[in-house]
Amino acid sequence: MQPLVRLLAAFLVLACSPGSASDNSVTVLREGEEPAGAGGSGTGDPTIPVQSRVDMLYELPPPPGCGDFSKATDEECDDGNLDNGDGCSGNCLVVEEGYQCPVPGSPCELAEVCGDSRRILTETCDDGNAVGGDGCASNCRLENGYACPEPGQPCVSTIVCSDGFVSGGEECDDSNLVAGDGCSDTCVIELGFECLIQGAKCRTICGDGLLRGIEQCDDGAAATPGCSATCRLEPGFACIVPGAPCVATTCGDDVVEGTEQCDDGNLVPYDSCAINCVN
C-alpha cells in the first residue's frame, strides 16, 4: 500500500497548493519518491479518515499501463480493464471492498472477509467486526439468540425470557416472569431448584437441606426418619429446622406438631381430638 499512500499524498499536496485550480495534473509518484512539501513522510494528512482517503484514490487518474494485465509498482491491482465495481478500481489504485485480486491480469474474486460489513458467500452475518459474543461470531456465523438483519450494523437479541425457550445467556425458561418458582423473572435458576425441561415448571431439589416450593420438609437427606424421599412429612414427626434431622412428636402433650391435626393434652377419645391427635 506504500505506493498508494504516496499517490494520495501527492494528490492532497497538489489539490491544496496555490495554483492547483488552474493546473489539474497529478504527478504519479514512484517507489522511493516523496511529494514536495510533505515533510518526507509520504503519508499525507493523518487527520483525513481512511475511507475518505480511499474515496480520493478513486478520483486519481490511472497510472500509465493501468489495464494492461500487468501490475506495476504504482498500481494496487490490474485486472485488464478500466472498470469500477469488479474488484479492481478503474484506475488500478484500489482493491475494492469484498474482493481480492491474487493474480495480476486476471479478474478479481469475491473475498469472504469477516468484519468488512459485507455478507457474502457462506457468511450468515457481518456486523463490521471479527469479534464473537455480540450476535455474529468471529467467523461471521450467526450466533444463537440473535438476528443480524443489516450488514455492518450491530446484531439484536431475539431472546425473550418467558417464551419457553432457553437461549443465549438464559439458564432456564418456565414460560412466565414469576420469581420464586425456580426460574426467576430474569430466567436464572433459583437456589434449591432444578429446571430440566425448558418451558415447564422447575422442581425443588429434595435432600439439599433447603425448604422450597411444595416441600413439607427437607432434612438434607439425613439418615433419620421423619422426612420422606419426596420431602413429605411422615406421620409422628416434626421437621422444624431445614437441613436438620426431624424429631418424633408426642401426642397428648398439648402441643400441635408435625402431622398432628390437634393435641388437647390428653389421650381421651371422643372429645373432638382422637387418641392419635387426629380431629
Image: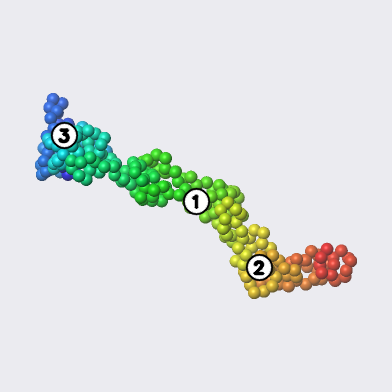
Residue at label 3?
Answer: 62
**Residue 199 is at least partly visible in this image:** yes
Q: How many marks?
A: 3
Q: Are marks 2 and 1 in contact (CB under 8 Å)?
A: no
Foreground pick, 80 / 271: 80
Foreground pick, 220 / 88: 88
Residue at label 2?
Answer: 229
Residue at label 1?
Answer: 167
Within-10-Å neighbours for mark 3: few <14, some 14–19, many 20+: some
Q: Secondary structure at mark 3?
A: loop
Q: Residue at x 65, y 66 (%)?
A: 218
Q: Amino acid at mark 3?
A: Pro
* Quarter containing the C terminus: bottom right
First in sequence: mark 3 vs mark 1: 3
Which of the 4 image quarters holds residue 41? top left
Whether residue 274 is situated above or below residue 37 in the rendered picture = below
